[in-house]
Amino acid sequence: MLNSLDLEGRPQDTRVVVAMSGGVDSSVTAALLKAEGYDVVGVTLQLYDHGAAIHRKGACCAGNDIHDARMVADRIGIPHYVLDYEHRFKEAVIDRFAASYVAGETPVPCVDCNMAIKFKDLLDTARELNAEVLATGHYVASRAMPDGSRALYRAKEEERDQSYFLFGTTGAQLEHLRFPLGDLGKAQTRALARQFGLAVADKHDSQDICFVPTGRYTDLIERLKPDAATAGDIVDLDGKVLGRHDGIIHFTVGQRRGLKIAGASPLYVVALDAATQRVVVGPREALTVRRIALRDVNWIGDGMLDRVLDAGRLEVFVKVRSTRAPQAAFLSAGAGGYEIELVQGEDGVSPGQACVFYDSAQGQARVLGGGFIRAAVAAARAA
């Protein structure tokens, strides 16, 4: 039932810090490890001003969630600490989120949060508390390899898999991270929460953009960057002006609604040009992408990536959105950096999103790494 922590020594002599968000997943993680006899310490991060979100379902790391985490810690009998990370979170996640939208991208803030906060700063805190490992409630698996290193794998329950958001985890970090829920389903997790008598057993899951209380991300961007909503033209693929818009921050690639322009056939946002403040639209077929240029690539597969690619392009399976299944692709290195060639093509690919590599499209595939999408070339324009 429990994905082994793969640690030497007796559990009672082994300290484990659990990142407790106040949700059911991290609460069950703490309860499971406590039941196994580990010396568990719960840590909750206050990440943003929670006044506006305190009563909103789906918010996390703020308000009632801190209370819930403390309540669970009391229930299972472990020490619990709340750390103020608001300034760091704003700098590493919220400000980057706003800047990405202004640049015409579609960011994935959960990736930044995991890379910069949870698996960097919080892992440092775990070491300061003399913990052997940091455990989280993510639905992803970590396994020991024959050479003693650890590898990351997709969760057993496909619809709960969160590996897309963890591609930036490094090999060194994996040595000190554990994910006890990787082989469990959500129903099993909630059943365990009831078994442990946790009041959060039926609590709603948190949303991806937890720091946007209203769900309207443009409100946040305009507050942080008052001059972000610059009006511009809506143009077709040939540059012909079809209408006007109130700012590219209101649009994402693949969007159809809200264009307020008429056409003989449905039009979709194909690209956003931050330099000219233009929204480029076209027919649905113009959304299909074959080639993707990447930045900030993180490799956690075997060997050094450049050496692996010395033999030519590498066959991988990739996800360009968290909700889509992995599809066949080829990873290669060129003068401009790393690139992905999609075998079947993909619709609605936007700069700023993550492109995550796997060794298979099936089951609990191994995560090989990934990168952020720097540019996407539509099949029609690449031909």
Image (cartoon, rainbow, N blue to C red):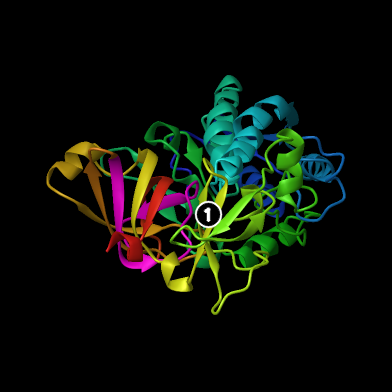
Residue 137 is left or right of residue 319, and the answer is: right
Residue 356 location (% of width, % of height): 41, 52
Residue 124: give x, y in percent of width and height.
55, 24
x and y, in percent, of residue 121 in the image = 58, 27
Relative vertical location of residue 326 with respect to residue 14 in this rendering, above or below: below
Name which residue type carries label 1: Gln
Residue 261 figure quarter: bottom right
Looking at this rendering, what residue extends furthest in the front direction? 240
From this view, report whether residue 282 is shown above or below residue 73: below
Disc 1 target residue: 162
Using the rendered view, name the quadrant where residue 347 is placed.
bottom left
Q: Position of residue 120 (x, y in %)?
A: 53, 29
Badge 1 marks a residue whose secondary structure is: loop
Instruction: Give, as a single range, the part of the protein colored magenta.
Output: 337-361
* Front-most of residues 317 and 119: 317
Q: Above or below — where is 160 with respect to 32? A: below
Residue 303 visible in the current orientation:
no
Residue 48 appears left or right of 240: right
Q: Evaluate whether residue 187 shows in this view.
A: yes
165 left or right of 41 in image: left
Category of crowding for the residue at label 1, using alpha-carbon neighbours closer than 10 angstroms: few (below 14), some (14–19), many (at least 20): many
Q: Between residues 367 and 134, which one lies in front from this camera angle?
A: 367
Residue 56 relative to residue 383: left or right: right
32, 326: nearer the viewer: 326
Q: In percent of the image, x 52 and y 40: which residue is there?
A: 275
Q: Residue drawn at (55%, 41%), measured in percent from left and top?
A: 103
261 or 270: which is nearer to us? Answer: 261
Q: Is residue 340 magenta?
A: yes
Name the residue located 30 percent from the left edge and 60 percent from the top edge.
382
Residue extending farthest bottom:
264
Taking the spot 60% from the left edge, 30% from the top edge, the residue there is 92
